[in-house]
Image (cartoon, rainbow, N blue to C red):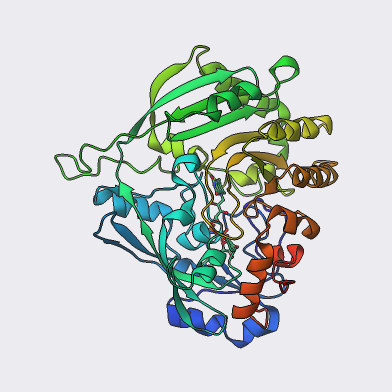
Amino acid sequence: MLSGWGRTRLSSCVVLCPRSPRELAEALSGELARRGGVIPRGAGRSYGDAAQNDGGLVLDLTGLRGLQVLPGDPPVLRAMAGSTLSEAAAVLAADGLALPVLPGTRHVTFGGAIAADVHGKNHRVDGSFGRHVREITLCTPDGRLRNLSPQSERELFCATIGGMGLTGAIVSATIAVRHLYAPMLPADVDRTDHIHQALELMADDVRHRYSIAWVDLLSGGRRFGRCTVMRSNDRPAAEALDARGELRWRLPGRRRLAVPKEFPSWVLSDQLVRAFNGLRWHRTRARPTATLVSAGAHFFPLDALGSWNRLYGDGGLLQYQALAPDDRPEVLIEIVQRLRAARLPMYLAVIKRFGEGSGGMLSFPKPGWTIAIDLPAGAPRLHDTLDAIDSWLVSEGGRVYLAKDARLRAELMPAMYPALDAFQRIRAAIDPDRLLRSDLSRRLGLEEVGRR
Ligand SMILES: Cc1cc2nc3c(=O)[nH]c(=O)nc-3n(C[C@H](O)[C@H](O)[C@H](O)COP(=O)(O)OP(=O)(O)OC[C@H]3O[C@@H](n4cnc5c(N)ncnc54)[C@H](O)[C@@H]3O)c2cc1C
């Protein structure tokens, strides 16, 4: 039984764990795949139903591991699809190097990072993960290994970046990396009374590489939507190793605490989260503050608590991540106001800024703004409210992130993702028997044949 990180829906799947590209090719083109379809899976950190395939085959690719740094300008990392960004960060740091893009958890695989074209807090400056991918080795449903790059098989390359595993299984990839930065980052921290002010701080900010706003959506009255805005830069690391040969750049805090199985969901209440949000806000000084923040706490604050998704109990958690176009930041405010009007509990919300897209056909980021809001999946009126927001969002030029989604309606896909048609045509050419499919692709009709 498999689910995504949000634990909203369980699917019964046959799971195979290939240990080599050959085993992977056999599984992908084999009898089990023909019977019930097949989808690759990484660390299972996507929130919804992207990495599961009810009644069919799932290829757990976490057994395909290996990392190698190759010199060059910039140097590149050759990574097997099942290695995690966390493992890579350690290997790279020893060579004075770092990954250019980090999502909010380091426990994702390279396969998952490319298939969702993940973004970090530096999207406006550095783009998403796909921008830094130089080459992909992809196993297609005919069992063939193909080398894709922006120069060769470009269309399939662009369909695979952000393609949610529906063009084949990524076996390995080459990623351009950057020089290591010091473990403490200079940051400007501001607190604002409303989202408007946070958006203003982030709008034309060219002084910072990273920016994020934590939004408190549980405080009432005038305080609704107060934010802590963290904008930061990095500095080159003086040296990767100290005098004893130890890595100076410690990997983000080792997980000390984890939420146990069977955690009762009633513990996570409005009151508790309200108190936590209030603490965060009050801890931030009223005047703008220049400070140093540790890379671990900055990049991966949620990794400090293992299995935190269990806090939401059996009902699970839904993360609604929406994008608003560059000139329409107020769309984000309208979203939270609509959720508030429906009296839905919004436990965690962050806003980030997006720059240019990567060219991935189903990639989420494009110039604009994004908000990600965590909601208990069992909350009354949640689905109807989000359905109504989706329909309106589309008319505003916005869209929903597929790696977080568990409930979007298929009819909105073509407007949200204008390259869907091209994606489907490419898919139909490499997967004429439609072997590659997931619960997400069935729900959204992604594996259907393009219309043109
Ligand atoms: C706490 C937390 C914070 C997060 N923060 C961010 C963030 O800041 N930015 C962001 O963009 N995302 C974020 N995410 C989402 C996460 O980065 C993506 O969902 C990512 O795809 C998960 O990678 P995974 O290895 O777990 O892949 P899975 O969840 O297992 O799979 C995700 C998709 O990738 C496909 N896939 C996996 N491996 C392969 C492969 N080898 N070949 C082809 N397709 C493959 C699957 O079929 C599926 O469609 C966050 C998730 C969590 C839990």
Q: Quadrant of ligand 1?
A: bottom right
Location of the C terminus by quadrant is bottom right
Compared across the picture, whether 56 is left or right of 88 comes to right
Q: Position of residue 214 (x, y in %)?
A: 58, 30
Q: Residue at x 60, y 40 (%)?
A: 368
The residue at 40%/40% (across/down) is 253
Image quarter hosting the N terminus: bottom right
| Relative image position of residue 396 (x, y in whole percent) | 74, 42
Q: Position of residue 15 (x, y in %)?
A: 59, 73
Vertical position of residue 154 compared to residue 105: above or below: below
Q: Quadrant of residue 58?
A: bottom right
Going by the picture, which residue comes out furthest to the bottom? Answer: 31
Residue 346 appearing in the image: no
Question: Is residue 334 left or right of 196 when viewed as pictured?
Answer: right
Q: Where residue 190 sits: x, y (%)?
A: 51, 20
Q: Is residue 8 left or right of residue 183?
A: right
How many numbered marks have been drawn onto this rendered protein structure? 0
- Farthest left residue? 243
Nearer the observer, 151 or 61? 151
- For the residue pair 436 and 378, the one nearer the viewer reads as 436
Q: Say which residue appears at 71% left-offset and 32% top-offset.
A: 269
Q: Is residue 278 visible?
A: yes
Q: Residue at x 30, y 34 (%)?
A: 235
The residue sitting at the front extreme is 452
Residue 437 vertical position relative to residue 33 in the rendered view, above or below: above
